[in-house]
Image (spheres, helix red, strand yellow):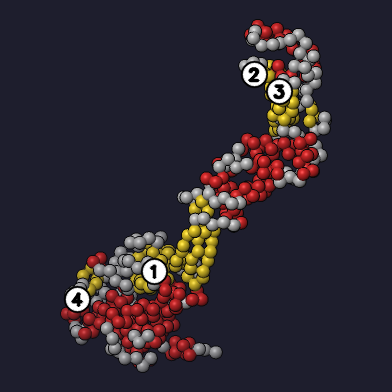
Amino acid sequence: APTAVGKRLAALPTHPRLGRLVIEAAARGAGARGALMAALVAERDIRRRGRASLTAHGERGRSGSRVEDSDVVEQLEAFEEAEAHGFSAGVLRRLELDPALVHTVRQSRDQLARALRLPRAPDASLDDERAALARAVLVGFPDRVGKRREAGRPAVVFAGGGSGELSPESVVREAAFMVCVDARRQGPRTVIERASAIDAEDLLDAFPERVESYVETRFDARREQVEQVAGLRYDGLVLDESVRRDPTGDEVAETLARAALTAGLHRFVDMDALTALQHRVQFARGHGVDTPAVDDARVEEALRLLCTGRRTFADLKALPLVPTLLGMLPPAARRALDQVAPETVSLPGRARVPLNYEAERDPWIASRMQDFYGLSNGPRVARGEVPVVLHLLAPNRRAVQVTTDLAGFWQRHYPRLASELRRRYPRHSFPEDPAS
């Protein structure tokens, strides 16, 4: 069933938006000016040549010299001045008002006033009714609220999405929040022709159901840190916001991890070590070890663990990602990995030689030839199934032989190489029987 307000709106000779404006103004004791304001909003600018404004002495001047709360109230002032002088032709010319539009506005105002049994003349000064008129405009246009992007700049963001720019001739030059009464497209831009300033408190008071509180955790890319913001939004438009730069909790770790992944793991992790672990685990999986692959999902899980208790990119420098990934393995899988695909092997001349695991290549090591002396056969991995590829290095650290058959190398190739190496490196030992 229609509400009492709905019935009143249906009986008014104007758009429901403007009807709400008038009814709200009347409820606040500014009905006469509310009717006039609705009539002004219903028409285009009543001035003939651009926007003009009242100076402190009542003379008309360009709006660039004037800062006001409302473009509509500025027109209302001009109309009331003309009416005070009987709408004489001379006054209309001086105020640069369009006589035909002024006549139309006057008729519309009178119709609304009669329909609502409102007085045609205001009961109070305009200054006393400014707040009531501003609230009335908001009630009529709650979906046209905007916020200035930056103080002193014309760019405005709209509640619900979208943006525009205040006309250079608008007198609303300082307000942070406003009702964008009407606008027009100018090429790719939306130009706000008339606006009416409001306060954030007006939105909270008039439409509490459209205001939501929020707490969000987000990453500040400029500061490279996670922060927590809390505030109020009106139809998605931020009214007020505070920032906490030392938040804690799981959401902080999750946000930092996402930001780190976006920036690239290479900023925080030894990528060579990570790749080596991935190949090592893949080798072990190919030789019967039941362990999860070190895929992207696993790496992301480890990164999230490491982000716990951290908030900034600076906190992530030199992350121990590989030890963390190893620590995530079940104990049995970790033992099997070490047995099948060890990180190092021992040689007679060197206790720990790093094993290199690469995609589609057998594991290999590189060490000085002298480190292999006393060894008849090279080491094996995968529980003895796979011989390690041996890179035997000369004193200049260059490989003189790459082989999996160390015994064959000692027999067939070493005698000739040793003779040459003794001449080139007389200070180094090249025995006749290196395997013993």
Residue at 36% x, 72% y is: 197
- Please tell me whether mark 4 sits on a helix, a strand or a loop: loop
Q: Nearer the viewer, residue 45 or 205?
A: 205
User: What residue would you read off at disc 2?
Assistant: 398
Q: Nearer the viewer, mark 3 or mark 1?
A: 3
Residue 22 location in percent, x, y?
38, 84
Residue at 22% x, 81% y is: 81
Residue type at mark 1: give it.
Answer: Phe
Is label 3 in contact with label 1 (beta carbons under 8 Å)? Answer: no
Real-space CA distance between mark 1 and mark 2, rounded to the nearest whole angstrom: 73 Å
User: What residue would you read off at disc 1?
Assistant: 177
User: What residue would you read off at disc 4?
Assistant: 58
Residue type at mark 4: give it.
Answer: Gly
- Residue 80: tell me if it is visible: yes
User: What residue would you read off at disc 3?
Assistant: 350
Real-space CA distance between mark 3 and mark 2, rounded to the nearest whole angstrom: 18 Å
Residue at 53% x, 49% y is: 312
Left or right of 34, for residue 287: right
- The numbered disc on residue 104 is none
Instruction: Tell me if mark 2 has few (under 14), some (14-19) or many (20+) residues whose alpha carbon lies within 10 angstroms of its own.
Output: few
The picture quadrant where one finds residue 280 is top right
Q: Quadrant of the C terminus?
A: top right
Is label 3 in contact with label 2 (beta carbons under 8 Å)? Answer: no
Of the residues under marks 1 and 4, which one precedes in the sequence? Answer: 4
- Please tell me whether mark 1 sits on a helix, a strand or a loop: strand
Q: Nearer the viewer, mark 1 or mark 4?
A: 1
Residue type at mark 3: give it.
Answer: Arg
Residue 231 location in percent, x, y?
48, 66
Real-space CA distance between mark 3 and mark 1, rounded to the nearest whole angstrom: 74 Å
Of the residues under marks 3 and 1, which one precedes in the sequence? Answer: 1
Real-space CA distance between mark 2 and mark 4, rounded to the nearest whole angstrom: 94 Å
Q: Quadrant of the N terminus?
A: bottom right
